[in-house]
Structures are given as C-alpha cells and as structure tokens.
Amino acid sequence: MIELQHAVFDVNGTLAVDGIPIQGTGEKLKRLSEHITIHLITAGTHGNLPAIQSTLGFPIHEILRGDEKMRYVQNLGPASVIAFGNGVNDASMLRLAAIGVVVVTPEGISTKTLQGADVVAAGPLQAIDLLLKPDRLIATLRG
C-alpha cells in the first residue's frame, strides 16, 4: 500500500500552457491541499512566476534541470510522493516518485517522460482528480 504525503507538480506545460494557468487548476489544488502537501516546481520557461503563483495560490520553487527536480522528490522521500509533469526535465522525478503521472496539455509531452510515468492524465484537472477521486487511481494501477 502506498501512503502519499506529497504531490509535486511541474507548472509550465503541466498546470499552465504558455505561462498561463489552466482555468480551474488553482481551485482544484486548494481542495487537494486539504489532503496532501502541494509542491509546485518549474524551470520558469515563460517567466511571470509571481502571476502564476498568485493564480494557483501556492509558492513556486524555480528548479531548472531534471536532476534538480529528481533531488527535490528524493528529499521529500519518494515513497510518499506522487509527481506530475510533461517535459524531459520531469522524466526522472516521475520515475523516482511512488507514482508518476504524465499530463497531456497543448504543450505536448516528452516520450521520455511518458516512458517513465505510471499513469497518463488527459489534462491537469483530470490529473488532480486522480487524487480527489482516488478510486480512479486505484482502478488504473490495480495489478
């Protein structure tokens, strides 16, 4: 049995497209934060991190490289982490986390990241719902 304590989200390409948060993600993250600790990390490709942080309602940690994202998950204790991402620099953290979720958005997904994921979500709202409605995740990962 997996006991998740931390949800680590890449921001750009995962929760935001072209530097603009996808509508509804902030509200869903707030609901999710009642059950699990939320961590937002990004390489900050599009800049405007203060505006994104304000919209999403959680602090954003700027982390540039994939190995840094992986270390972030390592420091939290990967057995208690579910990680979400879409880009090459997210691949190693998705592979390391207890559960890795690749999130499909208009920015696309890296095949390397797809190969390292346990689950594919059709978008960020659906990805967050995997935790808000855990039977979905249980059904997907059932062996």
Image (cartoon, helix red, strand yellow):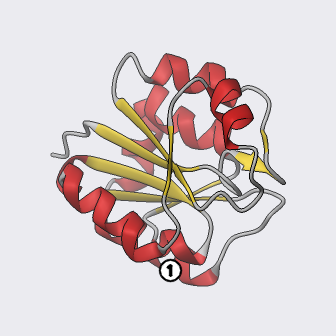
In the image shown, does 141 or 81 lie closer to the viewer?
A: 81
Residue hosting label 1: 115
Q: Which residue type does callout 1 highlight?
A: Gln
Residue drawn where x is 71% and y is 57% of the image: 13
Which quadrant of the rendered structure holds the C terminus?
Answer: bottom left
Residue drawn where x is 62% and y is 49% of the image: 11
Q: Is residue 9 left or right of residue 13?
A: left
As helix, strand or loop, the secondary structure at mark 1 comes to helix
Q: Quadrant of residue 22?
A: top right
Residue 98 at least partly seen: no
Residue drawn where x is 32% and y is 58% of the image: 72
Residue 84 spot, x, y in % from top left: 50, 54
Residue drawn where x is 43% and y is 64% of the image: 118
- Above or below, 11 against 5 in this view is below
- Above or below, 54 against 14 in this view is above
Q: Is residue 1 left or right of residue 81?
A: left
